[in-house]
Amino acid sequence: MERTFIAIKPDGVQRGLVSEIVSRFERKGYKLVAIKLVVPSKQFAEKHYHDLKERPFFSGLCDFLSSGPVLAMVIKSPHVIKYGRKLIGATDPSKSEPGTIRGDLAVVVVRNIIHGSDGPETAKDEIALWFQPKELVSYTSNEEKWIYGVN
């Protein structure tokens, strides 16, 4: 089992897409282990996007992430980072396949609705940035035996 960080960005929250997006992860069988609605400060957004600091769009990206509420989540499942990103779709919605979150719900790259960790180290760092360990819930879902074949 691995964990990943997912954030529904301010455009997704403001457009009322939270339930649609969360339900896609739940229908897939991914386990939600943490969730909260926050309005990050610009300084917090700069920490989140620290790896993009040298890019010309960095400041605008941080302004956008801190412009309104963000739904932050941690999702757990085998291979959730790789397959979760497939569910999300390409960063540029015009290059995202139909059926993906961005392919179905986003139009332009600067308002692409959702963020997902791109690897195990990034997931670990982003989860630690957005959540305290006590906010991560550990439980056994009644559906696990039907999803993972565990009895």
Image (spheres, rainbow, N blue to C red):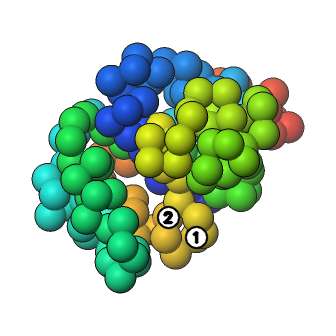
At which x and y percent is residue 122? 49, 70
At which x and y percent is residue 123? 50, 64
Which residue is the site of mark 2?
123
Q: Image check: 143 left or right of 51? A: right
* Few, some or many residues within 10 Å of mark 2 (<14, 14–19, 20+): many
Q: Image check: 41 left or right of 32? A: left
Quadrant of the drawing holding the C terminus? top right
Quick one: SS at disc 1?
helix
Of residues 128 and 46, the one nearer the viewer is 46
Q: Image check: 1 left or right of 110? A: right
At which x and y percent is residue 88? 64, 43
* Few, some or many residues within 10 Å of mark 1 (<14, 14–19, 20+): some
Tag count: 2
Quick one: SS at disc 2?
helix
Quarter where residue 44 is shown: bottom left
Q: Which residue is at a point 61% across and 50% down the rendered structure image?
A: 92
Of residues 77 and 16, the one nearer the viewer is 16
Residue at the limit of the structure toward the right, as seen here: 149
The answer to whether residue 91 of the structure is visible from this angle is: yes
Q: Amino acid at mark 1?
A: Pro
Which residue is the site of mark 1?
120
| CA separation in Å, label 2 and label 1 | 5 Å
Q: Are marks 2 and 1 in contact (CB under 8 Å)?
A: yes
